[in-house]
Amino acid sequence: MNKTINQKAWFFVVPVFVLVAFNAAIPLMTVVNYSFQETFGNNVFAWEGTRWFKQILLSERFHDALGRQIAFTFIILLIQIPLGIGIALTMPKKGWGVPVCLILMSMPLLIPWNVVGAMWNIFALPDIGFLGYSLNAIGFDFNFTQQPGDAWFTTILMDVWHWTSLVVLLSYAGLNSIQPAYYQAAEIDGASRWATFRYIELPKMKKVLTLAILLRFMDSFMIYTEPFVLTGGGPGNATAFLSIDLVKMALGQFDLGPAAAMSLIYFFIVLLVCWVFYSLMMKNEVKS
Amino acid sequence: MSLELKNVEKKVGIETHIYPTNIKLEKNTINVLLGSTLAGKTTLMQIMAGLDKPTSGEIWFNGENVTGKQVQKRNVSMVYQQFINYPSFTVYENIASPLKITGVNSNEIKDRVGKVAELLKLSAMLNKKPDELSGGQQQRTALARALVKDSDLILLDEPLANLDFKLREELREELPKLFEDRECIVVYATTEPSDALMIGGNTATILEGKIIQYGKTLDVYNKPENLTSAKVFSDPPMNIAEITKSGDTCKLADNSVQWKSNVKIKDGNYKIGIRPHNITTYKEGSNTVEINGKVLISELSGSESLIHFTNGNLNWVSLSNGIQQKNIGENTKLFMNVDEFLYFDKNNRLVNHG
């Protein structure tokens, strides 16, 4: 059979190529380009090979920022996932309570990130903020602008307040998709509340929880706006997570080469963790 | 062993789901609850199991009042329309789960699970997870979980409804055999009259929260107490027509069909109920009468032919064996088996049979 040659398809494909080129490929390539060169401004570049990558990977500053980042992400996941599941389990399944709970839960998610940062900054100020003032009034020496521990406490509390809702909503959706017959079957078997959770609810929630953990991992690992507004990375470098440190390097010091190399390393870490986690969680699903 | 509901009533808000009901199920029987969707079959079963409390009335089991006794403390098992198994357990662990909770020792568990698995043809898939199985095998696993426990009461809530035709036929044949040598009461809910006939035992016809009739399945089928029970126990729907009887002659109200009848009832007006398979394109039985009809729809169902036709201002359904194609609008002649007519009086009670 003779195929007629029709080049019209290009007409449909080219716009996508152009769009992807401008919003993803070209910026990424620019970063890759910077990461191998040294620039002194005036569009003068010098080839540096892998020097910036070695420098970043060996620098104490990067290790510290990465350490803080991992600690932060780990802590908030450890709090938000169980707390989110717990709240979802106690939410009503029918009646007027459902819309009320859903609206309350959605609220923190709808607030712009820098507003969340600003809110918590004011809320936690030791002299005028409700939280800061109250903590001091009951005898805690709380000052998040000067004490690293307090800064961490406030940042974590803020993130838990802001993002636990996402885990709640996803878990709630997962729980609601379980047919009542499963609970009856467990009741007939005489299964305890814990066994019902462990062997029915948790396996049935596996997919949404995987999604929740992935989303929370990515978002928290790339967190910038809220701690930037709340603490600015301080006191000192106490809450300078990877993104904050990166911006300091790129814009504050105008070290474009090392900053570009750090961006790429950062990007690969996120990609790698997501991939490993997702493959592990979905290992059993692929078979069926 | 017996299960008795005494004046059991269930109301939700102002709606009545079950009207005051009395029924006694005896030991070693299979009891079919037959009724359409929302007739109250599931509610009735949940009350029997103790998953739901009646608004009023009592449930007695083995001479003990078990109203309000928690389901965990009663020896009950239940199989649902959906295939309910623990998703993260293997088939073996699923079947073993009710035994593990009650603390049976592991050798005995192994033994009992093995036996039940063999009975339900699951021996080859004991190490698989439910979602690796076909629907039929998932339901077999759920059945095995119900059987392994040696429950006093086994409730099956439309267990075959979500299976495709072939698997349903296969499992339906096996079901009565599974319960043959068991000391238990089985309750089986279904919307399909053919399920009830296949399973046998006893049948209760249910409509809108009321048990219409309860008795031996064949008795309920052959001698429905009233028109409602006959309608519930007929699929395709029963043909109903008004007739007049004088002497030994009966005729349809519009005089279109006339037949001799030796039914011992007074002269007067009655309703007759004719099951579709008693109107056929060929003569069946020793005593038939012709009816003329104009074909509305002619369809095949397996190796049977359904012909919908009009006679006078009534619509009729006939069910014949074999492939009997008719053209729409065609005038045709069918035969009714007079011996199988059911006669109902003005209160819709069966007055005689045949």
Image: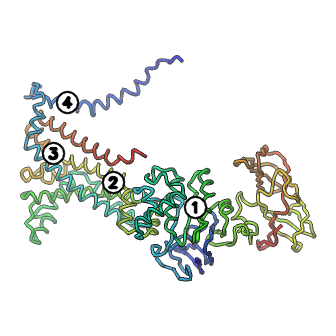
Check whether the beta carbons of the residues at disc 4 and disc 3 lie within 8 A of each other: no
Mark nearer the viewer, 4 or 2: 2
Q: Which mark is residue A209?
A: 2
Do discs 4 and 1 belong to a common subunit? no
> Distance of mark 2 from mark 3, alpha carbons?
25 Å
Q: Residue A174 at x, y = what percent?
A: 39, 56
Q: Secondary structure at mark 3?
A: helix
Which amino acid type is shown beneath numbered disc 3?
Answer: Leu
Q: Secondary structure at mark 1?
A: loop
Mark nearer the viewer, 4 or 3: 3
Q: Residue A112 at x, y = what percent?
A: 25, 51
Q: Secondary structure at mark 2?
A: helix
Q: Which mark is residue B158?
A: 1
Q: Can you identify the residue that label 4 sits on? A: A30
Q: Residue at x 39, y 56 (%)?
A: B88
Q: Is residue B311 visible?
A: yes
Which amino acid type is shown beneath numbered disc 4?
Answer: Thr
Which amino acid type is shown beneath numbered disc 2?
Answer: Leu
Task: Indicate left or right for A192 with A259 as reference.
Answer: right
Q: Earlier in the sequence, mark 2 or mark 3?
A: 2
Do discs 2 and 3 belong to a common subunit? yes
Task: Indicate left or right for B336 with B236 as reference.
Answer: right
Q: Residue A246 at x, y = what percent?
A: 14, 42
- Quadrant position of residue B189: bottom right
Task: Indicate left or right for B328 with B151 as reference.
Answer: right
